[in-house]
Image (tube, coloured by chain):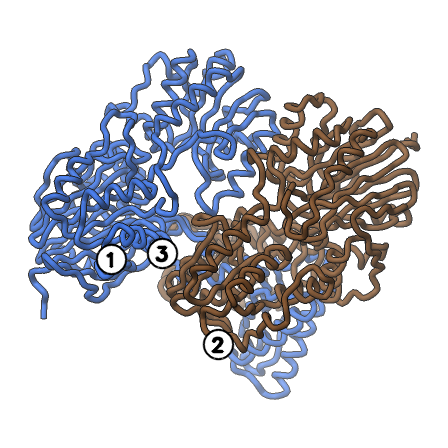
Chain colours: A brown, B blue
Amino acid sequence: MASKNVLKIIPLGGVNEIGKNMTVFEYGNDIIVVDCGVSFPEDDMLGVDLVIPDISYLLKNREKVRGFILTHGHEDHIGALPYVLREMNVPVYGTRLTLGLVDIKLKEHGINKAIFNTVKANDVLKLGAFTVEFIKTSHSIADSVALAIHTPVGVVVHTSDFKIDYTPIDGQVIDLAKFALLGKKGVLALLADSTNVERPGYTMSEKTVGQTFESIFADAPGRIIVATFASNIHRIQQIVNAAIKYGRKVCISGRSMANVVAVAMELGYLNIPKKTLIEVDKVDSYPNDKVVIITTGTQGEPMSALTRMAAAEHKKLEIIPGDLVIISATPIPGNEKLVYKVINQLFQRGANVIYESLADVHVSGHACQEELKLIHTLVKPKFFVPVHGEFRHLKQHALLAESLGMPKENIFLVDIGTVLEFTHNSCRVAGTVTAGRILVDGLGVGDVGNIVLRDRKHLSQDGLIVVVVTISRETGGVIAGPDIISRGFVYVRESEGLIEQARQVVKETLDKCEQQNITDWATLKTNIRDELRNFLYEKTKRNPMILPIIMEI
Amino acid sequence: MASKNVLKIIPLGGVNEIGKNMTVFEYGNDIIVVDCGVSFPEDDMLGVDLVIPDISYLLKNREKVRGFILTHGHEDHIGALPYVLREMNVPVYGTRLTLGLVDIKLKEHGINKAIFNTVKANDVLKLGAFTVEFIKTSHSIADSVALAIHTPVGVVVHTSDFKIDYTPIDGQVIDLAKFALLGKKGVLALLADSTNVERPGYTMSEKTVGQTFESIFADAPGRIIVATFASNIHRIQQIVNAAIKYGRKVCISGRSMANVVAVAMELGYLNIPKKTLIEVDKVDSYPNDKVVIITTGTQGEPMSALTRMAAAEHKKLEIIPGDLVIISATPIPGNEKLVYKVINQLFQRGANVIYESLADVHVSGHACQEELKLIHTLVKPKFFVPVHGEFRHLKQHALLAESLGMPKENIFLVDIGTVLEFTHNSCRVAGTVTAGRILVDGLGVGDVGNIVLRDRKHLSQDGLIVVVVTISRETGGVIAGPDIISRGFVYVRESEGLIEQARQVVKETLDKCEQQNITDWATLKTNIRDELRNFLYEKTKRNPMILPIIMEI
């Protein structure tokens, strides 16, 4: 029985994981999708570039989809658009900066036909059965919004990523009154950011970072190089402000940083006086204490400008003793070693490096416990769905809501693909739809799966042994080989004896098979693989992949 | 000219890196070696199990080596002994617990002939030109010592890993008086732990963790499972104490935990009343609120007991809703994702999990800035060599020493293999000796190097294409093939077309070669590799390893 007068909320990404945020809202014949993000590959996804949500459910309901609504311009909220719009070119709604960043991305992918609709905070948008209100928030990127989605069964508030910053750089404080007003009128459900739920207290204001910059800039005797996320426009503005205050020119380095800065300046989100900006080529023509270089590479990304400077592989910029490098970010879990490697190299080249362990050169863009409590208290939702976090975050967020008096049964910890069905006074799990992760590797979208990853893992651990034999079609006898080629297993030059012994093992296996009249290739290959595996494991305690190839002539 | 009356200090590990601590002290015909540790493989050392120091220098000076002196029983200080003692069976000196842990390790490696000499704090040991004093310290393992090494040119103090704990669990406070006395008499050089130099203030006392345990145990309604490092005897003692206080039995789970606990109990470092200990099989016969399970797996190690419980793959222990899991450690950089995965799984199975983000269930074993300042101030060395840290740590430690008034030119930031030469009033860098990292993979020690690692990396990213062709020895013509086999590249079933096209590319290349009378194999292989690489990159933007194999008959 089709449940007609119900609202469905279906996360296709962003729960039980960090990243690839995407949430489906469905009522009758209308679907809107909030955000369309990527996540970065897990450690076991060898060689994979990106992970995007499985959108089978949207493709199956293609004619219902009224549009994508973007809350801000971070990769984990917009990064999958180039892949998704190729499959379904529906309208995209977002604030100016968000769409400006999407535009850069789509152009890089050669997509020109996207349908953009610019919105701004306080706008109200009607899409089928839904009326979407955009609410000003603060986050580590400018022009971010939360959503109040009015549906026939009630209002759903989706905070998306946010923090409460009473002194934001753009002067526009998060619209707490709007949250309060919605709460007062009655909110059916709250979906809220869980990223920082483990942290007590409040997230510091972005402005505190500016104060740290100012005090560091005041004393720096040489060049200053600041690495930050390209999308953190307000951070960049504060670096620029400190530079101007202390009479330094600003050089923007790195392609993604240059792209974002250009868009942000064009759209009026970033103000850098023309006479302050200098080109990379001109850096050397200014005294060291008159230059600030703003660049990417806070995560130790191998191809980023800072990483290349640290490794002395940057074409135009060289670290010189006396440089002060500020890494204005924290390592994302998993990147620590890469970041520390860059820091070590910078110190070794004579730079001084300031990073989060040493000074307050970064603040988070996500709400801590006290901020979350404030939003819960203002919005007073009937039902609560924690989003944007691993299970531990969602669970802690659920406990936080309970601590504020929300009944346990009104809190829903869901997985991607879970269908939540709402009426005006109920919420229940009503099944699941297809959801998952699609791996992007080079041009391939979805052609790398578990078998390929398992093979890559196997190859990465102990390498490979290829065994080639040519066999006579007539007699079944060996005409050439066995030859053995190894890669990633042992230094062949040092282990010639071992490889020769392995060849003997294969030879004896083939002889035995011939004596036993075993001629079918599958058995032959299995025997070779088994005997060789046992031999090599006993000799080396390693398990290379063994690839027997039989040629027949 | 041989510099005869000088002391040489040569780190073979433990500087510009975390781990594989090993320092050579040489005077005339005598060498003593402080510690003999392993480090864990870096992310780019695919498939590698362990890294040990290159001991070429010791092997070359084998007849001079009077012994290994161990400061404590952690892997990064003792783990390379099984490999090194196989090459040179010299006496090993250490405290009782340290040697007890070495003994477990050597037995696992089938080494029975080690020459052990037990020492204790305050002992004085004469070894050739050296007189070594053992000084009581605190660390995250019991029975750790610092060293005062008296040499003909002066005294060198080597703190090894330490912290200053005024309320240690064993009641034996670090021997500050000894450091002061040495300082008063005059110390030539200080080598000191740099691990926590980035952290201001003091490291908390181990006792604070015990207080946290007690308050958690007081309220826990169900089973308690505590994961910690097996070697942290004092932590285990505090868990046991809390268990006894609240009437719970203690079950030790995991092979390494059981081994260490057995040795520590036998040697008197750990006191668990017999009636408190229960076997794993007996856990279910006690009420949930009468049991504590102590186990390993704080780093999310795939084979550890906690990881297997979290994944429901443990043979004897199952997580049940209501279990309280305490992870009493912090993730070592690089392990964060593994640890969080375990935490997520535990929550999903209904356990409550307390980890460092949520409560003070761990303290470090290393000295923070104020503790380091105290040691520097007491020891008042003429020269300072920061050790045990990456470059950033060594650099910060140098700055800390400078801030206390030490002249910059008296501080030496050295690399592994650097030879420092001391007279009674001078220190200089006097060249280098062979030093490096030897990779252990399975039974292989040193047979995995850069080429093998590069191949593993390549294979892990985009997989492998094998091309096999059989060619006639007489005519040079193709008799069979080309056949193409791929692994870790694409789903073959979905990409049959691509593989068939690749076969055509190889065929055409072979035809072209035949027309141009190219018969030498190297050129043939290069051409196949180049054409196929270009074709595949254009089609997929991936670069699998291409392995052309030519069989001749």
Residue appearing at x 58%, y 74% in the figure: A279
Residue appearing at x 68%, y 58% in the figure: B492
* Whether marks 3 and 1 lie on the same chain: yes
Q: Amino acid at mark 1?
A: Ile
Q: Which residue is mark 1?
A: B411
Q: Amino acid at mark 3?
A: Phe
Q: Which residue is mark 2?
A: A284
Q: Is residue B215 left or right of residue B122?
A: right
Q: Secondary structure at mark 1?
A: loop
Could you tell me which chain the residue with mark 2 belongs to? A
* Front residue (pair B82, B501): B82
* Residue mark closest to the camera, 3 vs 1: 1
* Front residue (pair A483, B322): B322
Give residue B100's quadrant in the image. Answer: top left
Q: Amino acid at mark 2?
A: Asp
| Residue contact at pointers 2 and 1, CB within 8 angstroms | no
| Mark pair 2, 3: CA separation | 28 Å
Report x, y in % for residue B21: 29, 49
**Looking at the figure, which quarter contains the N terminus of chain B?**
bottom left
Report x, y in % for residue B298: 45, 35
| Mark pair 3, 1: CA separation | 14 Å
Classify mark 1: residues with Cα within 10 Å, few (<14), some (14-19) or many (20+).
many
Classify mark 3: residues with Cα within 10 Å, few (<14), some (14-19) or many (20+).
many
